[in-house]
Structures are given as structure tokens and as C-alpha cells.
């Protein structure tokens, strides 16, 4: 059995993830199944998996560990993470296990664990206890063997997604659908594919271990970009490997930042549901906060991470939430008995954008150009530093006074530091997954963005490793 250091390496902030089979293999997966069973002591555990070649052998191993502890398995087969969350909540299961490495390359795999109503288990929320159980291997002895029951929830899930639709779609819309060889494409097509003119690519699994199912990588979206240009489509919708992140290309094959997609979605949702709360990843463009307020909603700034966003949505009963990374979160439909269900979903934002395009008869570029013209945001910049806390103190001291324009910065100590001025702001925070500091900057002009990046790069280089 692998040692504690090896096992600790695959337990991340929000889930379990590692290279298969060097870091995450059937032996560890079997113990994960045992650990989840012993931690929750449920009668049943719902299990789903993504399309990776390694997911089925890991499913068999996890299932073996679960059944060895006398717990029954409900197997929903290959699915997206959002479909898995729905299945756990709708079936009122006490816990569930999803085998996926999300947007990581296919040489990786992983495990997501959730509690009742699909509340995620992260470090500080119980995942550390699973880590201890897997490492120690002291499991109770069961007198009975669990069983496996397979069910197909595809139609029920598709019908649930359709309850979010309120507008007939324009059949002339020509959209590329690219799920990065994951299961999201077929689900999306079942929801709205026959209502538009879709061009479907990468709908089937791939055995290319080097392929990266992450549309933020230029090579992953290259094929979709070429089709958009060559076939003059109205744009493209892309999903990552497990379908919990959603990305948009306009008719010019331009990738639309998640910031701007969030702003458009928030405005649309608040028109239908005024006076609601929206949970915002603190890295989001200030355009998002302004539009939410202008639309009569209440934006609530929150720390980064899907478990933190979902937890805050639950506490605030928020209708919508978003992260810069392409995660969009929605409150469940009360008509379906899911008013306490809060989950990320990659198909609902696609459906809403199609509704917006159908109603406004606007091209995607026309929807998003005003944001590109007014808001200039850096990519998330990474800096290796000697001491993250010392770095944060250095930055706070540097910006705590009045600047040369006589302006006092607003300093927000949430998930690192956010420093806000009238015309620009930035956030610096320790990564939850890597030994780096992450920085994002937004300014009101393209020229000033470069200047601010240079300024912070110089400051942080003093404290680099």
C-alpha cells in the first residue's frame, strides 16, 4: 500500500486527483470506497463516472470497497458531474461518489465526494477524514456484502434542464457544440439540439491520453474555432471533460471571458427573477457587480472555490453564482422539489444564451463587445514566493496609504487581498492547489493594464523563491 505522503498528494482542496495509475490506482480506489462507506455509514451510495478509459476500472475498485463494507451501490453509469449532483439530490441519497478528473488531461483521474443534496466534501468539510481513513486502513468488518443496481436517469435529468427554458429558440441559430470528448454534448443536444442548427464535434470518447479536455487551452478549442470561421456559424459552445464548466466562442471565434458571460447571464436571470442574490467569485470583473446592481439584484462577493460558492448560495438562498473559471451555479427548481439544491451546471448557461440570442436577434459579438471596450482584465498570473503571508503583508503595506492621485485604496481581506481604486483593482491570493500566489488585475484601459502588471511583477519579484 502507498505511504501517507503518496496518498496526501492526491487529496486536493476540493477533491481527489492524480495520474493514473502512478498516483491514483485500483488499490487506493478500493480503500476510498471503504473510507466513504465507513465515514457516512449509509445504506446506499450513488456512483457516477466520466468517459475516461481509467474510469471504469476505478469504478469497479471503488464499488468493491463500498460493497465490502456492506453498502449497496446505485450505479448511474457515464454522466457529467452536474448530472451526478442532480441524481444525488433528486434521489435524496446520503452520499455519492463521482469518478472524474474534470478538465485535467486524460492521463489523470480523480474522485469527487458529496453529502446529502450534493453538498461537496472538501478539505475542512470532511475530505481530510476520508484521507485519514484511506491512509490508516482501519475499516470495520461487515457481515454482509453490498449489491449493485444500475439505473438510467438521462431522460429525467434532461427534462429537469428543460424546466429552465422559457423561450422558443431560433431554429436558424447555427452553433458548434464541442464537449471535449466528454458526455456533456449528448446531454446538451437532447435539451436543445433539435431546436437549433447544431454542428456536433468531439461527442465520442477518445483514447488519446495526451488530449486536454480543457477549452481554456488553445489547442483544445482549435477545431471549434476553425469550424466557426470556415462554416460561418453564429458561435460555439464548449464544455470541459465532466461538463461542469462552460465556454463560449462568438461568430469571430473569439473566446468570451467567463466574466462577461456572467454579466450577461446575471442580467437575464434577474429580469425574470428580480431582487435576488447573486454570489460572485471575488475575481470577477466589476462589470458583473455593476450589472447585477443595475438589474435590481444583490451581488455578494465570495472566496474562490466551488464548495465555498455553493455553501454561500445555500446560506443566502441565492438564485445564481459564478466563478471566473467558467463555473456557473444555479438554485434548483422548487417545482421539482429541489429548492435546497445548489449546483454548477454547464448546460443551463448555454440554454440561457440561446434564449437571449433568439429574443434579441443579436450576434454574440454584439452582446459582448461593450465589455471588451470598457473592461481590461489580465489572465490569472502566478508567482512563486518564499512566504505567502509575508507577501500579503508587503502588498498591504505598499497600498495602505494614499496614492499619488490622492486616492485611498479600499482593502478587502477575503481570500487573500483585494485592493480597489476608482479605475483599477487587483486580487492576490495563495493558490488552493499549487505553491504559488495568484494575481488578477482589472483596469479601465489597455495601456494601464500593462503598467499595473509590470508594477506588481516588480513588487512580487522581490519576494520570489
Image (tube, rainbow, N blue to C red):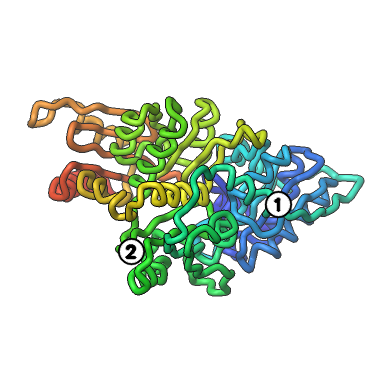
Q: Check the image and report above or below for 245 versus 284.
A: below
Tag 2: Cα neighbours inside 10 Å, few (<14), some, or many (≥20)? many
**Residue under label 1:** 153
Q: Check the image and report above or below for 230 versus 30.
A: below
> What residue is shown at x 35% (from left), y 52% (from top)?
361
Seen from this angle, which residue lies furthest right?
Answer: 143
> What residue is shown at x 62% (from left), y 37% (from top)?
126
> What residue is shown at x 58% (from left), y 47% (from top)?
162
Q: Tell me if 31 is positioned left or right of 142 in this view.
A: left
Counting from the top left corner in percent of width and height, residue 121 is at 60, 40
Residue 375 figure quarter: top left
How many numbered marks have been drawn onto this rendered protein structure? 2
Position of the N terminus by quadrant: bottom right
Label 2: state its secondary structure.
loop
Whether residue 437 appears in this view of the structure is no
Q: Tell me if 263 is positioned left or right of 47 in this view.
A: left
Q: Decide which of 38, 360 is in the foreground and name it.
A: 360
Q: Upstream in the sequence, badge 1 or badge 2?
A: 1
Real-space Cα separation, disc 1 to disc 2, in angstroms: 34 Å
Counting from the top left corner in percent of width and height, residue 190 is at 59, 58
Counting from the top left corner in percent of width and height, residue 66 is at 78, 50
Counting from the top left corner in percent of width and height, residue 376 is at 23, 47
Residue 266 figure quarter: top left
Q: Decide which of 164, 25 is in the foreground and name it.
A: 164
Q: Which mark is residue 273?
A: none
Q: Decide which of 362, 335 is in the foreground and name it.
A: 362
**Residue under label 2:** 253
Tag 1: Cα neighbours inside 10 Å, few (<14), some, or many (≥20)? some
Whether residue 197 appears in this view of the structure is yes
Label 1: state its secondary structure.
loop
Amino acid at each position: 500500500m502507498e505511504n501517507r505522503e503518496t496518498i496526501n498528494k492526491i487529496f486536493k482542496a476540493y477533491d481527489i486527483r492524480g495520474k493514473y495509475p502512478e498516483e491514483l490506482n485500483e488499490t487506493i480506489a478500493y480503500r476510498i470506497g471503504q473510507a466513504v462507506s465507513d465515514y457516512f455509514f449509509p445504506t446506499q451510495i450513488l456512483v457516477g463516472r466520466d468517459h475516461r478509459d481509467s474510469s471504469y476500472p476505478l469504478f469497479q475498485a471503488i464499488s468493491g470497497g463500498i460493497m465490502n463494507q456492506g453498502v449497496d451501490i446505485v450505479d448511474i453509469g457515464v454522466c457529467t458531474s452536474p448530472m451526478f449532483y442532480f441524481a444525488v439530490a433528486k434521489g435524496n441519497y446520503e452520499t455519492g461518489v463521482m469518478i472524474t478528473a474534470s478538465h485535467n488531461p486524460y492521463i489523470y483521474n480523480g474522485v469527487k465526494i458529496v453529502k446529502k443534496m450534493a453538498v461537496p466534501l472538501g478539505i475542512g468539510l470532511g475530505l481530510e477524514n476520508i484521507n485519514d481513513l484511506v491512509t490508516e486502513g482501519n475499516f470495520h468488518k461487515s457481515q454482509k456484502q453490498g449489491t449493485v443496481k444500475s439505473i438510467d436517469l438521462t431522460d429525467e435529468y434532461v427534462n429537469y434542464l428543460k424546466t429552465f427554458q422559457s423561450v422558443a429558440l431560433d431554429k436558424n441559430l447555427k452553433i458548434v457544440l464541442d464537449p471535449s470528448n466528454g458526455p456533456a454534448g449528448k446531454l446538451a443536444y437532447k435539451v436543445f439540439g433539435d431546436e437549433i442548427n447544431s454542428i456536433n464535434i468531439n461527442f465520442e470518447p477518445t483514447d488519446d491520453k495526451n488530449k486536454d479536455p480543457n477549452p481554456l487551452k488553445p489547442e483544445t478549442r482549435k477545431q471549434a474555432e476553425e469550424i466557426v470561421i470556415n462554416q460561418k456559424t453564429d458561435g460555439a459552445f464548449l464544455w470541459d471533460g465532466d461538463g461542469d464548466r462552460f465556454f463560449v466562442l462568438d461568430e469571430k471565434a473569439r473566446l468570451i471571458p467567463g466574466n462577461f458571460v456572467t454579466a450577461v447571464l446575471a442580467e437575464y436571470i434577474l429580469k425574470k427573477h428580480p431582487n435576488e442574490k447573486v454570489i460572485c467569485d471575488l475575481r470577477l470583473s466589476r462589470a458583473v457587480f455593476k450589472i447585477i446592481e443595475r438589474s435590481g439584484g444583490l451581488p455578494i462577493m465570495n472566496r474562490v472555490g466551488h464548495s465555498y460558492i455553493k455553501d454561500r448560495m445555500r446560506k443566502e438562498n441565492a438564485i445564481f453564482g459564478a466563478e471566473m473559471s467558467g463555473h456557473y451555479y444555479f438554485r434548483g427548481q422548487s417545482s421539482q422539489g429541489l429548492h435546497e439544491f445548489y449546483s454548477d451546471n454547464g448546460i443551463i448557461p448555454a440554454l440561457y444564451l440561446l434564449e437571449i440570442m433568439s429574443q434579441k436577434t443579436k450576434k454574440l459579438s454584439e452582446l459582448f463587445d461593450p465589455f471588451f471596450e470598457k473592461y481590461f482584465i489580465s489572465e490569472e498570473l502566478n508567482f512563486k514566493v518564499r512566504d505567502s503571508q509575508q507577501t500579503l503583508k508587503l502588498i498591504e503595506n505598499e497600498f495602505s496609504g494614499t496614492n499619488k492621485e490622492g486616492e485611498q485604496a479600499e482593502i478587502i481581506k477575503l481570500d487573500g487581498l483585494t485592493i480597489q481604486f476608482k479605475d483599477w483593482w487587483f486580487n492576490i491570493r495563495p493558490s488552493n492547489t499549487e505553491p504559488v500566489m495568484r494575481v488578477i488585475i482589472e483596469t479601465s484601459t489597455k495601456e494601464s493594464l500593462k503598467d499595473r502588471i509590470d508594477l506588481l511583477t516588480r513588487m512580487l519579484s522581490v519576494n520570489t523563491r
